[in-house]
Amino acid sequence: MSQINFSVIIPTYHRNDLLAKCLDCLAPGVQTLPAEQYEVIVTDDGSQTTAEEMIRQQYPWAKWVAGPCKGPAANRNNGAKYGQGEWLAFTDDDCIPSLHWLEAYSTAIMPNFLVYEGKTTCKQGIHSPLEHAPINLTGSYLWSCNLMIYANLFLNLGGFDENFPHPHLEDIDLRERLNQTKNNYRFVDKAIVDHAPRRLPGGHKLGISHESYVYYSYHKKHVVPSKNELLKEIIRNRLTRIIHYLGHKESPTAFISLITEILCVLNNWDHWIEKYRI
């Protein structure tokens, strides 16, 4: 029996149509890496519906597992638990891996490198101030939508931190922990994943997500979080996007969303400080 070298981990949540497109690109005989060298694990946080039946009928070569329903960090960790490969390759359910994705990672492996990141594109492009995508063309981001890590290292690190109160900053936290442990990582230009543009959440949801910044500052960086610095960063990022698409029909909505996001941070800041202060 051949050794499984790579476990592909795909967290999903109520996006069967996009997941199907992702799985189509990972099918045996479609990926240029021999099928016996990799497995695909879909970890599913779906509550109203799941992808279990779709995978059983259309993608029987993939393994479906129920997720813990505790957010994307916990869902990725859950999928990793089932992996039998020496390496864990993470992507998202709204991503399209290139046909050479796994082969590119396989041929890039070098001694003393236990972490690799691929190129993440967005071929559709961003056409609205209310859209975004985690594009990575030159490396150093370690976005979890296109990441390969040695399984034992991932386990020893404790995986993604599941204590973040909202899906925000978990990727950066993993990257910083790897930096602190002196684990070098390598950019693999030919390990390409295309990420569809995502709709930004509403202003309130964006605002609430910044609770993760307070948690990260206190418990990871061990510094007092700065409300002013956070607000400057929010305004700079959102206004840059709005100005870039000035005149777009959704620009007024984006501006209202920015105001709502700022007010949400201001209204919740003291509560977050009390909750996470060490």
Image (cartoon, rainbow, N blue to C red):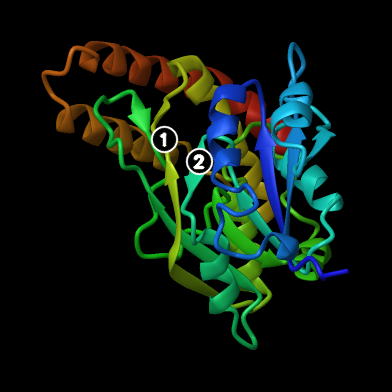
How packed mark 2 is, by other alpha carbons closer than 10 Å (few <14, some 14-19, many 20 or more), is: many
Mark 1, secondary structure of its residue: loop
Label 2 and label 1: CA atoms lie apart by: 6 Å
Residue extending furthest bottom? 111
Query: Which residue is rendered at x = 35% and y = 43% of the image?
Result: 122
Q: Position of residue 37 (x, y in %)?
A: 72, 65
Secondary structure of residue under mark 2: strand
Name the residue carrying label 1: 196
Say which amino acid is labelled 2. Cys
Q: Is residue 163 visible?
A: no
The residue where tag 2 is placed is 95
Amino acid type indicated by mark 1: Ala
Would you identify the image quadrant in which residue 76 lies? top right
Above or below: residue 128 compared with residue 11: above
Between residue 265 and residue 47, name the one nearer to us: 47
State left or right for residue 140 relative to residue 48: left
